[in-house]
Image (spheres, coloured by chain):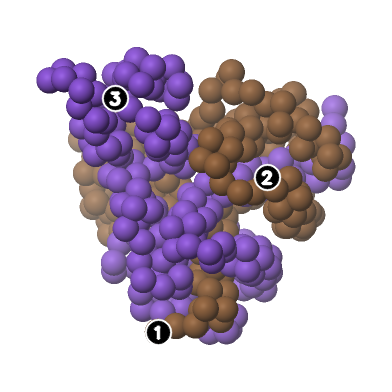
Chain colours: A brown, B purple
Amino acid sequence: MRISELSRASGVPVATIKYYLREGLLHEGQLTSATQAQYDEGHVARLRLVRALIGVGGLSVAATREVLDQLDHPADSTHDLLGAAHRSLGPAVDEDVDTSAAESLLDRLGWQVRSADRQAVRQLAAALTALEAADFPLSEDEVVSYAQAMRAIAEREVADVPLESTEAAVRYMVLGTVLVEPLLLALRRLAQVDASARRYGTR
Amino acid sequence: MRISELSRASGVPVATIKYYLREGLLHEGQLTSATQAQYDEGHVARLRLVRALIGVGGLSVAATREVLDQLDHPADSTHDLLGAAHRSLGPAVDEDVDTSAAESLLDRLGWQVRSADRQAVRQLAAALTALEAADFPLSEDEVVSYAQAMRAIAEREVADVPLESTEAAVRYMVLGTVLVEPLLLALRRLAQVDASARRYGTR
């Protein structure tokens, strides 16, 4: 199909498609003349994925390129994939954040975290630091209770990783991180609204 | 204290303090001469809060101003506070997103969501749409299981809202939304790493 048809099939404007082509988020079509190229269903699928990552995932163009690169060139082992997925996904945190409170929490939880996953440890450290800086009243027991809830979710997610191909596993892990996060946050907010309505009543 | 002392006490550079003053994120000090003002512990506390919201919360200056405005001028009822907190907090979603799948999920869950909380419903709708657009394999039962996990978290959070003053309640709800979200996401990632290490082994 031509670029105008690709636009109709994907719902993405021609100008945006050209931008994604320039940025390397979408592979070039098959040139049929000096000024025209043909696109296929693979382009439609990739465009929908890019829109999902940038739109709801809230990723930058650079982060989207990294995620797509992981999908196209997967790491060697299933467990390494996860580290790679996390490293390229936000939020970026200063390397020099103090991780001692995060480390002692992980010790208490008994979680195994390798050096390759320092990015997530730093994110935890930054989150704990911000709560403390804002004087938010959250006890260590409450943090552990959040951790246990997330642990139950993660257990199920990791058990569901499709193992029939590395590509399917990467896709599941990367998209599961990027696209499920907004789902969880929206559900938490709505659950708060519901719990608040039940407890304090609506007017 | 003078602005240089405020900078030392808060760890925020003088140039940044001046920027926050111009943007209305920090209230002016007490003028002691045409070019000098005195600041107090209230300024130190507010600066730490602003850094937490912008730094880890990832809020824009405009969103931070809205959150601070809610802290300073709370809504009338505890339940209304929550709607106000959610409305000013990201991610912004198109008004015309199709919410029918989100509505039917909320029906199935039996959650009460008022029209004032449309923003969170649209966020849920956008998250579901992105998962579908990316062909991510997530069954309705799996979404419900995420919802139940978030429900358990929200029940406890809402039960913990401090009711001794409206200000304390707003503070708890706004900061609980902005600052606990990064904590939950970091914990989920680390829980995945741990679950993956246990299941697939480390190398």
Image quadrant assignment for residue A128:
top right
**Which of these two is toward me, A155 or B6?**
B6
Residue A135 at x, y = what percent? 55, 42
On-image quarter of the C terminus of chain B: top right
What residue did someone put label 3 on? B38
Tell me what residue is drawn at x 57 percent, y 74 percent.
Answer: A195
The kind of residue tagged 3 is Gln
Tell me what residue is drawn at x 49 percent, y 57 percent.
Answer: B168
Image quadrant assignment for residue A152:
bottom right
**Which of these two is toward me, A49 or A200?**
A200
Q: CA distance from mark 2 to mark 3?
A: 41 Å
On-image quarter of the N terminus of chain B: top left
What residue did someone put label 1 on? A203
The kind of residue tagged 1 is Arg
Q: Assign a secondary structure to mark 3.
A: strand
Residue B60 at x, y = what percent? 33, 41
